[in-house]
Image (cartoon, helix red, strand yellow):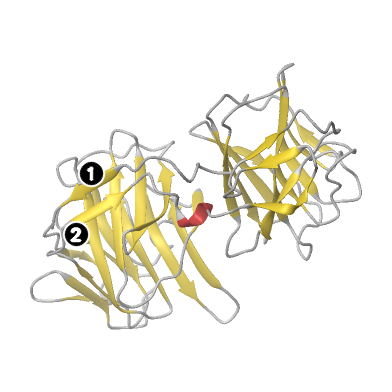
Amino acid sequence: MNQKSNQKSMWVQLYPNNFQWDTEKRATDITISKDGYSAMRTASKGQNPAVISTRPLNKKQPNVRIEIKKLGSWIGVGLADSNFLLHGNKTLGAQNTGVNSSYFWQNNSSSIVRKIQMYGEQSVDVGEVNVGDKIDIVVDFDGQKIYYFNNEILQGWLPSSSRMLLEDKIYPAVSLSFGTEISVVTQDIIKLNIAQKPYCLFWKWDTQRKAPAIQLSKDCYSASRKDFPKGMNPAVMATDPLTKQRSHFRVQLEKLGKWIGIGICDERFILSESKTLGTQPGSVNAAYFYQNTGINRLQMFGENSFDNADAFTNGCIVDIKIDFDANRIYFFLEKITRIFSSFTNCIIGRKIISMY
């Protein structure tokens, strides 16, 4: 599952920057310190107030480090272009105008939201945020990706597949709740590993919930099908279920055989000697299914399907995300246009488990 744990490191050494917050490009609820490095929301009347920096990011300075000094009920730390609306609209990373992205955290009475998000179209679940944390945002302009780190631990990355990340056009930015204060870090020498396994991808396959024909690596991140014992349509589940706080997982295909199904299921799914993932009745199960005879489809418990999906290749990355509120499953295939499944059968209230 995901990337191999022995993947080689790819270290990027970055240096202190002197980004300052722009007094002319801020919501009135946000106060900026005299030196321009700190920003705080001091009033509670405005809707999702934000501020951007005086200078944009580029290849010579593709990163910013922001420290959380005080934390209110929510925060968004990221970047935006000149189309971003600084108040009276959605938070940073959720606006569908221009390029904007953020590491977003919210703690309310019903749940804790922790995700990186991009212009309301993409999101990946990430780790907790606390006072004193240092958030790094790094833009790969060549690869068109944004990397997010918390205390130098990679939380995840998002590809900008539909809108270009252009040099000198996107700026460090923050959206702040009442009582939240942040500061640009100007002294640290920053060394980040952009090839480490992100927090959002820490899923393992379950040694107890697998068919005999499935073989797992020692670290349980990788799964393969053995020649013996024989079995019909063998499968394996992950150790942990998907939740609203952790609703996404990623699989990298190291080697393709004749067919594969990647998706989700509940505890009633039969792991061997039954139909493939996405075609079993009596269980919540869905899959992005590939077969080398030309079959490429999204399918759910044998009742719904969407044909003519893009074909898998060796090394490709598949992302699956569940929207529990909307009863939808989203399938992504690397940088290819998003594949969307709007199956609306009852999923909420059932235990959903990632499945290979």
Disc 2 crowd rating (10 Å Cα; few below 14, some 14-19, many 20+) is many
Spot the residue most to the left: 35
Residue 271 seen:
yes
Dot 2 corresponds to which residue? 53
Residue type (three-letter) at the residue carrying disc 2: Ser
Quarter of the image for residue 327 reads bottom right
State the image coordinates of residue 71 (x, y, percent, origin top left). 35, 79
Task: Where is residue 307? Give x, y as percent.
Answer: 73, 27
* Mark 1, secondary structure of its residue: loop
- Residue 97 shown left or right of residue 329 in the figure: left
According to the picture, the residue beneath numbered tag 1 turns out to be 169
**Residue at 14 percent of width and 59 percent of height:** 19
Q: Where residue 169 appears, x then y in whole percent?
A: 23, 44
Q: CA distance from mark 1 to mark 2?
A: 12 Å
Q: Secondary structure at mark 2?
A: strand
- Whether 341 is drawn above or below 352: the answer is above
Q: Residue at x 52, y 68 (%)?
A: 113
Q: Reply above or below: 257 against 140.
A: above
Q: Amino acid at mark 1?
A: Lys
User: Which residue does the image show at 53% across and 55% down from the upper left?
Assistant: 202
Quadrant in the picture for residue 303: top right
